[in-house]
Image (cartoon, helix red, strand yellow):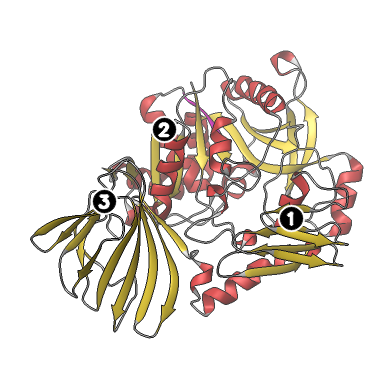
């Protein structure tokens, strides 16, 4: 059985302001109407012998993962929750332990959840070669023939082909892994034909990768075994033991194993692959107009060329500019030279140092029951729009520092207020005094939408005391 292991724990800081810490790029529809996570899993359709995926994500994103899988009718084998990101080596170890617990002969196909690959046939052809090599005990990584001298990717220097046999001479030895090069070195690599972009996609037997980790990174295997064995189920998820998992080093699979093992090989993946690691990469993979522009949303241009312009909430007009990235959201606007987009991380770091909310979340914040959006924030008051999906409910809760007034604008609300249960229809309202136990539910078949006016001395989200929660949220 081929078991996909989907690595969905990244933060995507270089795609700010669309990608935020609480809603990173793998959960965004950056290329088409589906998110990158959904496309990663749907790309496996048509591959013979592929089982249900194991998805590994940060515990903060667990409800996003579950909801996006349900939206495309995917039932995962597991959703494993990391309490903290520790890079790819510990994540792969967890996936291997989970897959091996169900199938001792499992072959893992490790896929980052935030990549773009448009050609399914070429992908499946390369994966077919990988399965045969993996069953022979090889650890396979997949490399992409470079299309331009990219400085944002690592490279793999190709070695000699393995004996043809079942591998058709397309499985190559690995001479070495190379860090992200400068521009001149990247051009030399591309012109030589001896190098491939390192895609971060792997295939190997679960028992074989764990065996090589025992050899080269035994501390990872020890920490992950303890974290997995002490873990527990949590609704649709499996929560590994936090203290044990934190003992892992922060290290990639390349550094921990692939650069040391004698079993590593590389298979070229002749596809228009991109890790979508920057706005220039998003611009590159999308269809452009005659002037080389990509426009999304309400955008008007005049004498503009080779730009990526994304409008989320407002009209964006551009005149007489070229080679720019412009991304507008409800609470932030990015303007960057297309050749300098790798430096967006510095902006995100500055926002975090200032504890700015724009680094972490959008104005619309998603919850398992729906979402809320901050509309106006003032001194001792805040106005939100709350949207609750049909059949869902918020936690039974209270606040120490604020009172709330709710006005239903669409749908029907079932409100618990103290010992009361009241049904509110459109244009009806209710007041929730400070310190009162309350809950909001949507008993209807259409989304519930209401306006919430908060008043009080402190309006932060941490002023929520959960008394009962159907989602078993710890925080």
The answer to whether residue 180 is left or right of residue 130 is right
Residue 261 vertical position relative to residue 126 in the rendered view, above or below:
below
**Circle 2: is it few (<14), some (14-19), or many (20+) Cα within 10 Å?**
some
The residue positioned 51% from the left and 39% from the top of the image is: 6
Q: Residue 260's x, y, as percent? A: 63, 43
Image-quadrant location for residue 421: bottom left
Q: Nearer the viewer, mark 3 or mark 2?
A: 3
Mark 3 lies on residue: 393
Q: Is residue 269 magenta?
A: no
Mark 2 lies on residue: 76
The answer to whether residue 9 is left or right of residue 43 is left
Determine if residue 217 is in view: no
Q: Is residue 107 magenta?
A: yes
Q: Secondary structure at mark 1?
A: loop
Q: In this rendered view, identify the residue nearer to me: 12 or 80.
A: 12
Q: Residue 4's x, y, as percent? A: 51, 31
Q: Residue 344's x, y, as percent? A: 67, 67
Q: How far apart, in angstroms, are the residues tagged by discs 1 and 3?
A: 44 Å
**Circle 1: is it few (<14), some (14-19), or many (20+) Cα within 10 Å?**
some
Tags 3 and 2 in contact by the CB under 8 Å rule? no
Question: Which span of residues is magenta-colored?
Answer: 106-110
Mark 1 lies on residue: 152
Q: How far apart, in angstroms, are the residues tagged by discs 1 and 2?
A: 32 Å
Q: Which mark is residue 404?
A: none
Q: How far apart, in angstroms, are the residues tagged by discs 3 and 2?
A: 24 Å
């Amino acid at each position: 059985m081929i078991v996909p292991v989907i690595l969905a724990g990244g933060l995507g800081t270089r795609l700010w302001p669309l990608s935020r810490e609480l809603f990173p790029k793998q959960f965004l529809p950056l290329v088409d109407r589906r998110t990158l996570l959904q496309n990663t899993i749907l790309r496996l359709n048509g591959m013979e012998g592929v089982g249900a995926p194991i998805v590994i994500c940060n515990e903060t994103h667990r409800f996003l993962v579950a909801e996006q899988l349900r939206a495309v009718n995917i039932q995962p084998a597991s959703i494993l929750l990391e309490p903290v990101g520790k890079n790819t080596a510990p994540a792969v170890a967890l996936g291997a332990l989970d897959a091996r617990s169900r199938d001792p002969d499992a072959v893992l196909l490790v896929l980052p959840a935030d990549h773009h690959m448009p050609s399914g046939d070429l992908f499946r052809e390369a994966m077919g070669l990988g399965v045969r090599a993996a069953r022979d005990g090889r650890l396979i990584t997949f490399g992409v023939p470079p299309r331009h001298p990219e400085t944002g990717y690592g490279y793999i220097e190709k070695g000699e082909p393995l004996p043809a046999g079942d591998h058709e001479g397309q499985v190559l030895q690995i001479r070495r892994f190379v860090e992200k090069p400068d521009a001149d070195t990247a051009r030399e690599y591309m012109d030589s034909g001896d190098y491939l972009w390192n895609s971060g996609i792997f295939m190997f037997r679960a028992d074989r990768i764990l065996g090589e980790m025992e050899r080269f990174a035994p501390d990872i295997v020890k920490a992950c075994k303890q974290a997995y064995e002490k873990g527990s189920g949590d609704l649709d998820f499996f929560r590994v033991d936090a203290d044990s998992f934190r003992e892992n080093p922060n290290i990639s699979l390349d550094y921990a194993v692939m650069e040391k093992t004698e079993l590593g090989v590389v298979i070229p993946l002749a596809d228009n692959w991109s890790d979508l690691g920057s706005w220039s990469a998003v611009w590159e993979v999308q269809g452009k107009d005659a002037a080389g522009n990509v426009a999304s949303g309400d955008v008007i241009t005049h004498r503009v060329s080779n730009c990526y312009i994304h409008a989320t909430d407002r009209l964006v007009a551009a005149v007489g500019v070229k080679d720019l990235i412009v991304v507008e959201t409800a609470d932030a606007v990015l303007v960057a030279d297309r050749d300098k987009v790798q430096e967006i991380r510095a902006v995100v770091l500055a926002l975090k140092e200032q504890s700015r909310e724009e680094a972490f979340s959008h104005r619309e914040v998603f919850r398992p029951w729906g979402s809320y959006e901050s509309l106006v924030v003032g001194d001792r008051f805040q106005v939100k729009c709350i949207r609750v999906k049909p059949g869902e409910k918020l936690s039974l809760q209270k606040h120490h520092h604020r009172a709330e007034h709710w006005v239903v604008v669409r749908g029907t609300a079932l409100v618990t207020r103290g010992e009361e249960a009241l049904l509110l229809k459109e244009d009806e309202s209710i007041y929730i005094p400070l310190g009162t136990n309350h809950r909001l539910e949507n008993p209807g078949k259409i989304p519930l939408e209401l306006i919430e006016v908060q008043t009080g001395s402190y309006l932060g989200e941490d002023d929520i005391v959960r008394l009962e929660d159907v989602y078993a949220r710890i925080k």
